[in-house]
Each structure stands twice: as structure tokens, then as C-alpha cells.
Image: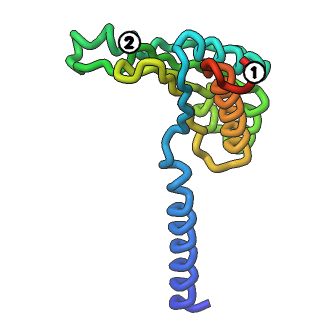
Amino acid sequence: MGTRQKSSHCFVAVLAGLLCGIAALPALAAGPATLEIAPSDYARAREALVESIEDEGLVIASVSGFGAMLERTEPDLGHHGNIYRDAEVFAFCSVRIAARLALENPDNIALCPLSIGIYELKSRPGVVRIVYRAPGTASPGDRDALELLGRIAERAQTSARIRLPGDAGPR
């Protein structure tokens, strides 16, 4: 194979790699998925989220008081304007998904635990949001994680919605 032909093959390989990388960017850059629960209140939505995680047979490993942390550190760090009335991040692990991610790539250990955030803004009382993101590897394990997180969030959204007089459906 001549030098010109080798260069051509290298160029095609590099171009293909770049195109694949660019195609994957929207999935990685999409940011968190968000579900809004309105009308609701934070305590009810939080309880529904905890139950939804536990209904999957998962154990919450930690709860980070994100809003409280911002409130506590505001005077020292000067990040004025804590926007949250309440905000927490729940971390948990699915052994099935963790094992799949690890088998896909040992470095995926950094993608566990999975997490879901929940918050209510001071400016929007009665509207609670649940947010989550997939690990972002665009692999079968990542798709499993995204499906699990979506299922948990949707179940919590359904359970936490406050029914107003005249609304149809179970409470």
C-alpha cells in the first residue's frame, strides 16, 4: 500500500471518528431530564420520590441537603441569592446497572451511584421539580440507567401530584 493510500485511509478513519463523536454530543450535552409536579408540596413529592426509589428495591445511600448547603455557605462564599425553598439530591445504586456499566468499561466505577435531585424554588411555591441525568456513556448500561431513573421520576411525579376538587383519577 502506498503512502498516499495510507494517508487516505487514516483521513477516513479520523473523519469517521470525529463524526461519531459529534453524533454523540447531543446525548451527552442534553443536560438533566426534568419532571414538574404541580400542584404539589415538597414534603409530599419528597416522600413519593423516596417510595419510588424503594419500590425498585434500591436503598438510598445518601441524601445531600443541596439547598441547605447553599444557604449555610452563602455568607462565607458570597454566592448571594439561594433560589431554593428546598433542594436535595438522593444517591442510590442499582447493582444490576452498576455491574453492566463496569463490565462495559472499568472506569465506569465513577458513574455510580446514580442520583436524582428534587427541589422547589422560592419563586414558584407549589411547583416541585425532579431532575436526573444518565451517566452519559451512550452504552446499553447507560440506557438501562436512564430507563430506571425515568421510571422512578415518573412514578414519583404521579404519586406526588395533589388532586384538586373535580380532578379525575386516584389520589
- Helix, strand or loop at mark 1: loop
- 42 left or right of 56? left
Q: Is residue 134 above or below residue 77?
A: below
**How far across and down, in percent of the image, does residue 33 sit?**
55, 38
For the C terminus, give its image quadrant: top right
Q: Is residue 73 above or below residue 102?
A: above
- Helix, strand or loop at mark 2: helix
For the N terminus, give its image quadrant: bottom right
**How far across and down, in percent of the image, does residue 131 sit?**
53, 30
- The amino acid marked with disc number 1 is Pro
Q: Quadrant of residue 37?
A: top right
Q: Earlier in the sequence, mark 1 or mark 2?
A: 2
Asked if the residues shown at circle 1 and circle 2 are in contact, with their CB atoms under 8 angstroms apart, the answer is: no
Give the labeled residue for mark 1. Answer: 170
Badge nearest the viewer, 1 or 2? 1
Q: Residue at x 59, y 17 (%)?
A: 45
**How far across and down, in percent of the image, does residue 22 sit?**
50, 62
Residue closer to the observer: 137 or 104? 137
Marker disc for residue 69 = 2
Q: Quadrant of residue 55?
A: top right
Residue closer to the observer: 147 or 38? 38
Task: Kindly report the distance in space between the C-alpha atoms of the residues bearing marks 1 and 2.
Answer: 36 Å
- The amino acid marked with disc number 2 is Met
**How far across and down, in percent of the image, does residue 66 sit?**
43, 16
Structural crowding at the residue carrying mark 1, measured as other residues with C-alpha within 10 Å and reported as few (<14), some (14–19) or many (≥20): few
Q: Residue at x 63, y 50 (%)?
A: 138
Q: Residue at x 70, y 15 (%)?
A: 51
- 117 left or right of 154? left
